């Protein structure tokens, strides 16, 4: 074969491969960079940190529900149906406040009619400083510069994900957006599982001082309060989730329970200064948190409990007020410090 003919054949092959990959990506855009997901369509939802940017940009919504893996099992349709506002779920497993900040800022930039934010503020993320963060969002997907999206278009992992999505769709394993990132159907929720998945720590000889986490809580609340102050016309529903009694066993044995509760009290008091915020606390929902049949480990609760929490928040239930939050947290502190934890294991 002549050199010219060989060159043309190779070039044609390259162009054909590139065309096939472009066709695959246009049909199966795994991270929704080129567009969102339509009603009735399905996709493979398996990478929140990469996929969420495209969903935030392209989906139609006026409200968001946001949080860590505890919120992953929420259905956005619960909020849409009960509020009348089209809602998008934004979830990062073991998420950090800075990640939610990046996501929410993008949502406000791309959706000026966004007027409702539901945010699950885990005590675990409230008390850890961002300097300890071990994960990183792909910021080129969350910024407003379209030029650096070439990192997505010319990346082998993108096409592997596209092929995976295509295969899952053909096998009937892709799901609708309302079922995105739901994981609780693959886990068992009962007392035996919760206890088995809870590695009980050794008892610490000393407790942390009550203000041990206040610096981290202040740093994280600065970010949350910037959302609130920057968008006074947006209503924020912020809640503390119903961690199980095993979580409080862990905190008391490690000597951190008092410091955690002090940080929660600080956060509640600061958030209640804003007129466009309601604060809901389920940490003391004793009927639920002491029933380990609701849990698969020490913090993650069943779909029935998450549905109850979502409905209660939407209906403005279990609210703290400026007048009652210290009293309510005093009751919770006494309950936690006085609980007979050994009875759980006897």
Image (tube, grey):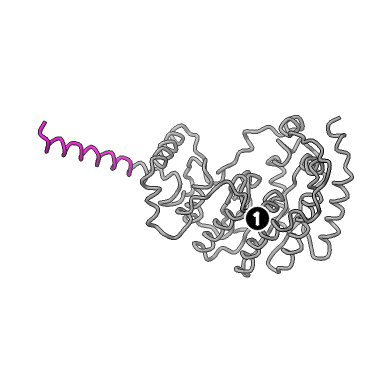
Under tag 1, what secondary structure? strand
Q: Position of residue 100 (x, y in %)?
A: 59, 55
Labels in figure, total: 1
Q: Quadrant of residue 255?
A: top right
Say which residue appears at 65% left-offset and 55% top-offset.
Answer: 119
Residue in front for this viewpoint, 59 or 280:
280
Where residue 276 sits: x, y (%)?
68, 67
Q: Quadrant location of the C terminus?
A: top right
In front: 312, or 239?
A: 239
Question: Which residue does the numbered mark 1 point to in the structure image?
Answer: 119
- x and y percentages locating residue 33 in the rendered image: 43, 51
Q: In which quadrant will I find the N terminus?
A: top left
User: Hey, which quadrant is residue 298 in on the image?
Assistant: top right
Give 89 or 12, whichever is nearer the viewer. 12
Seen in the picture, residue 258 relative to 250 is either above or below; the reply is below
Is residue 141 shown left or right of residue 61?
left
Q: Is residue 6 magenta?
A: yes
Q: Which residues are magenta?
A: 1-22
Residue 331 locus on image (x, y percent): 87, 53
Does residue 272 belong to the magenta stretch? no
Q: Residue at x 58, y 46 (%)?
A: 134
Question: Which residue is nearer to you in this view: 167 or 196?
Answer: 196
**Outermost residue toward the front?**
205
């Amino acid at each position: 074969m002549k050199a010219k003919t060989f060159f043309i054949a190779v070039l044609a092959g390259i162009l054909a491969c590139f065309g096939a990959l472009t066709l695959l990506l246009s049909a199966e855009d795994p991270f929704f960079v080129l567009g969102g997901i339509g009603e009735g369509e399905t996709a493979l939802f398996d990478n929140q940190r990469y996929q969420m940017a495209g969903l935030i940009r392209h989906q139609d919504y006026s409200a968001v529900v946001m949080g860590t893996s505890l919120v992953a099992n929420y259905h956005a349709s619960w909020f849409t149906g009960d509020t009348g506002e089209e809602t998008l779920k934004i979830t990062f497993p073991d998420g950090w406040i800075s990640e939610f900040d990046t996501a929410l800022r993008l949502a406000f930039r791309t959706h000026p009619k966004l007027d409702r934010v539901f945010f699950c503020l885990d005590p675990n993320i409230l008390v850890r400083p961002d300097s300890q963060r071990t994960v990183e969002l792909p910021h080129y997907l969350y910024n407003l510069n379209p030029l650096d999206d070439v990192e997505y278009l010319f990346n082998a992992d993108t096409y592997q994900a596209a092929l995976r999505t295509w295969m899952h769709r053909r096998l009937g394993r892709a799901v609708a957006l309302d079922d995105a990132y739901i994981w609780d159907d693959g886990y068992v929720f009962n007392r035996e599982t919760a206890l088995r998945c809870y590695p009980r720590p050794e008892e610490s000889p000393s407790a942390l001082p009550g203000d041990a986490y206040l610096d981290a809580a202040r740093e994280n609340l600065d970010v949350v309060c910037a959302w609130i102050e920057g968008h006074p016309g947006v209503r924020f529903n912020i809640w503390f989730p119903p961690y199980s009694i095993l979580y409080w066993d862990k905190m008391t044995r490690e000597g951190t329970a008092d410091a955690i509760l002090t940080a929660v009290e600080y956060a509640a008091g600061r958030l209640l200064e804003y007129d466009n915020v309601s604060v809901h606390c389920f940490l003391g929902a004793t009927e639920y948190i002491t029933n380990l049949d609701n849990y698969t480990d020490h913090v993650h609760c069943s779909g029935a409990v998450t549905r109850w929490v979502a409905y209660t928040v939407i209906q403005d239930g279990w609210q703290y007020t400026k007048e009652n939050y210290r009293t309510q947290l005093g009751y919770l502190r006494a309950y936690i410090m006085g609980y007979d934890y050994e009875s759980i294991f006897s």
